[in-house]
């Protein structure tokens, strides 16, 4: 049952969203909106859907060159009371995902409960338009963004939400798995999922070391596919069919990527970050080991690594520390700084590298809807 306070909050959410859209349509953001239109062009046949999708991307996904968002700038440039400010800040935590309508638990036709098919979290949903989405059948799927409504436990649809029948469940299960694999952090909204991801990552890491007596194994791209398929699945956590499906998914991660054609790929295991794939890491390690004697070719690869945002700072730190003092010589050469000192300059210089400074969990936990679909 929607209370009077919740009704007021939904009205405020609608008003704030309207103001945010008006801001997105302002001349100062016209160039950025056109960029979003080009980004989603071809995905929609309806001009209205195209416009809505572009606006949603601008408001909730787009980043300016300085790293700020449209919401950041709206908050900075608008005069808002505390209630509106809290509502807008809540919108930034919205989630674009797949949701399944659960059996009705409400006394009101306006609100209903969904399960996020990626995180398995349940949300109470109410549209800001009172007559929208009434009497949805259990099992119906919503595909789109839900924004939290500040001051309540409600979430409300944002943008163009697709509705699919319960018969689309097999396709939705596959899509949820794909989202969990490509964006595992979306599953971590569920604390239990995050705990399980950390636990599995640690188990996989320890097993990898037990099997290979090292946390790094270099191989070819062709051989990597089978190595990763076996390394990335924990026996005993599911039935054999589910494990076989997981291995096949891991195998395809390699065979359907450019890695399969690489002559040298290193699989690195970390107790938190999990598995990472690094092309020509042996060349980088050799450059750091050889120092002043390193070849130009190896130093060129090292330079590429230092400038690559996909190479984490924590991995560079490890390789440099393991190869001191010759790694300092190699850095002096590639940085063009003969007086560079790792002890004096190393930490501040490393912080300027574009990769992630600390390891973060990236392990994918298969959503319940997918596990149910193959059981």
Image: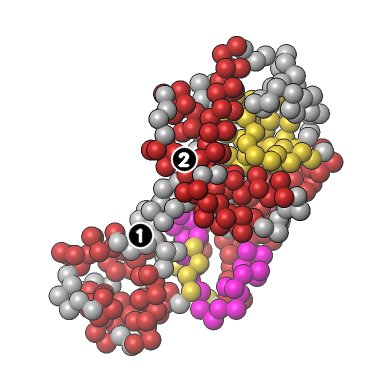
Q: Residues within 10 Å of mark 1 (few under 14, many from 20)?
A: some
Q: Quadrant of the N terminus?
A: top right
Q: Which residue is mark 2?
A: 71
Q: Which residue is mark 1?
A: 314
Which region of the structure is painted magenta?
Answer: 252-275
Residue at 35% across, 76% down: 303
Q: Who comes first in sequence, dot 1 or dot 2?
A: 2
Residue at 79% across, 40% down: 164
- x, y (%) of residue 2? 65, 15
- x, y (%) of residue 230? 61, 62
- x, y (%) of residue 53? 64, 47
Residue at 28% across, 78% down: 334
Q: Residues within 10 Å of mark 2 (few under 14, many from 20)?
A: many
Q: Closer to the camera, 17 or 325?
A: 17
Q: Residue furthest top?
A: 4
- x, y (%) of residue 182? 59, 54
């Amino acid at each position: 049952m929607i209370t009077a306070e919740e009704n007021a909050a939904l009205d405020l959410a609608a008003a704030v969203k309207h103001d945010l859209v008006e801001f997105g349509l302002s001349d100062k953001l016209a160039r950025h909106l056109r960029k979003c239109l080009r980004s989603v062009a071809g995905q929609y046949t309806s001009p209205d859907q195209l416009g809505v999708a572009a606006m949603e991307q601008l408001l909730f996904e787009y980043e300016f060159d300085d790293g700020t968002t449209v919401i950041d700038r709206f908050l900075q440039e608008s005069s808002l009371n505390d209630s509106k400010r809290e509502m807008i800040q809540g919108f930034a935590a919205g989630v674009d995902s797949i949701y399944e309508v659960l059996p009705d638990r409400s006394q009101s036709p306006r609100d209903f409960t969904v399960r996020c098919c990626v995180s398995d979290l349940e949300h109470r949903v109410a549209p800001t338009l009172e007559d929208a989405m009434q009497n949805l059948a259990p099992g119906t799927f919503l595909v789109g963004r839900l924004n939290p409504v500040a001051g309540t436990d409600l979430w409300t649809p944002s943008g163009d939400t697709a509705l699919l029948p319960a018969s689309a469940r097999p396709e939705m299960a596959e899509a949820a798995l794909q989202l969990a694999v490509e964006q595992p952090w979306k599953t971590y909204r569920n604390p239990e999922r995050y705990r399980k991801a950390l636990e599995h990552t640690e188990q996989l890491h320890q097993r990898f070391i037990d099997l290979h007596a090292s946390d790094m194994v270099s191989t070819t791209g062709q051989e990597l596919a089978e190595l990763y398929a076996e390394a990335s699945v924990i026996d005993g956590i599911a039935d054999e069919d589910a494990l076989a499906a997981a291995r096949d998914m891991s195998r395809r991660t390699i065979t359907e990527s450019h890695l399969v054609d690489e002559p040298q790929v290193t699989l690195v295991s970390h107790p938190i970050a999990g598995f990472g794939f690094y092309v020509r890491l042996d060349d980088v390690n050799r450059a750091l080991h050889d120092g002043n004697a390193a070849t130009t070719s190896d130093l060129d690869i090292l330079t590429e690594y230092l400038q690559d945002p996909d190479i984490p700072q924590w991995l560079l730190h490890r390789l440099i520390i393991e190869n001191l003092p010759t790694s300092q010589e190699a850095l002096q050469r590639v940085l063009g700084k003969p007086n560079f000192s790792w002890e004096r300059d190393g930490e501040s210089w490393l912080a300027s590298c574009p990769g992630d400074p600390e390891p973060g969990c990236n392990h994918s936990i298969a959503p319940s809807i997918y596990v149910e679909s193959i059981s």
